[in-house]
Amino acid sequence: MSLSCIIVEDLQVAADFLKKCCEKSGQVEVKAHFPNVSDALAYLNEHSVDLLFLDVEMPGATGFDLLDQIAYSPKVILTTSKPEYAYDAFEYNVTDFLKKPFTYQRFIESLQKVTAHADSTPATVSIDHIFIKTEGKLVRLNNDDILYIESMGDYVKFVTTDKKYVTHNTIKNLEDKVNKESFMKVHRSYIINISKIDDIRENDLYIKGNEIPVSKAHKPEVMKRLNII
Amino acid sequence: MSFNFNPKIDRDFIISMYEEDYPYISEVFATTLGQLIPDIEIVKKAFTNRDLESLRKQVHKIKPAFGFAGLRDTEALCQQFEDNCLSVSSTEALADKYETLIISLGECCNIIQQEIEKLKAHNN
């Protein structure tokens, strides 16, 4: 079992069939099923998943509205009976488009695209910036401008040299997404930019006057990453 | 042991979806019927309320349910009706097509109900 997913689908028989396909594949673990966008969004603000099976037309908001609102970018397979959405699917960079009803064989082909896409995605180490969703827009943050990232419950705060940005996300999710050469987790609530550390005292480190706790579990790794002469 | 589906059900399609897993096919039919009955009432309500967009959306929603049950003709009829909703400005213009659709939806529910009963006997 390598991929976690949720199903966002208002047609019960389609959701059930997807669950069965996931189970049969042995490659996808279904964490939850939601018949509407608002419940799915509440879940995604608390948890991160690798893959979304996402219907487009549902009561209330659409699947595309959900993609507009989530703070990170899991792989997405759209499940709809309307092929006209293919263009929008392309615009949202979704991995595949399953037209309902679909066969298990077609499901497997979609899954293979997800796996192939993941394999071809450049490693995060080569990326010198990230984009975050905040205040209704995507904002580019250069790695070198980020001092640290702090958990604030359902949100995280990106502290840069001149500004602070708050966005829906979790430290757990970001840990896998940030450039590991530049950043490291030092506490369950903090990811720091290693090059920005000014000094370390006992179980705290300091970045531009900000005191950041270092957990006992993370301290050996922090010390290893420092250029101590 | 093979099962004789109602001729309106696309047997080859059903087998391509679920193989010959008849207990699961029975579950699919039961789930489909359980959702179709209230959803068809919403279709009727949208038409009564002359709410063209809700009517289109609701027909769009139930359309693949017929596909999952192998009732491909009704799935196609729903698609036609959905397209028709986009080409008219009021529900009145769809009155004849709506009647045809509702009759077909009702027949399909009956067929699914019968298949559930037949499958129950077959699976025992």
Image: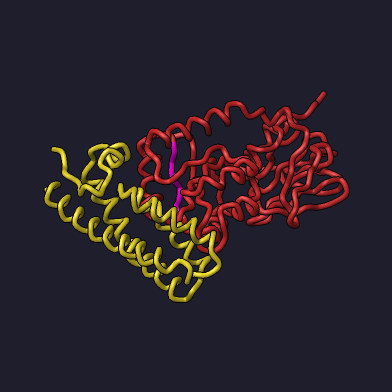
**Quadrant housing residue B13:** top left
Q: Residue furthest top?
A: A229
Question: Is A61 in front, or is A157?
Answer: A61
> Chain A appears what colour?
red
Specify the segment rendered in magenta: A28-33
Which residue is at a point 23% across and 56% down the rendered structure image?
Answer: B111
Residue A160 part of the magenta segment: no
Q: Is residue A49 left or right of residue A11?
A: right
> Chain B appears what colour?
yellow
Question: Is A17 in front, or is A229?
Answer: A17
Q: Is residue B2 left or right of residue A175?
A: left
Number of callouts: 0
Rendered location of residue B97, percent (x, y):
40, 63
Q: Quadrant of the N terminus of chain B?
A: top left
Rendered location of residue B38, percent (x, y):
35, 67
Q: Is residue A62 above or below residue A175?
A: below
Which residue is at a point 43% across and 60% down the rendered structure image?
Answer: B59
Q: Is residue A119 left or right of residue B80?
A: right
Magenta: predominant secondary structure element?
strand
Which residue is at a point 55% across and 47% down the rendered structure image?
Answer: A84
Residue A32 part of the magenta segment: yes
Question: Is A90 in front, or is A60?
Answer: A90
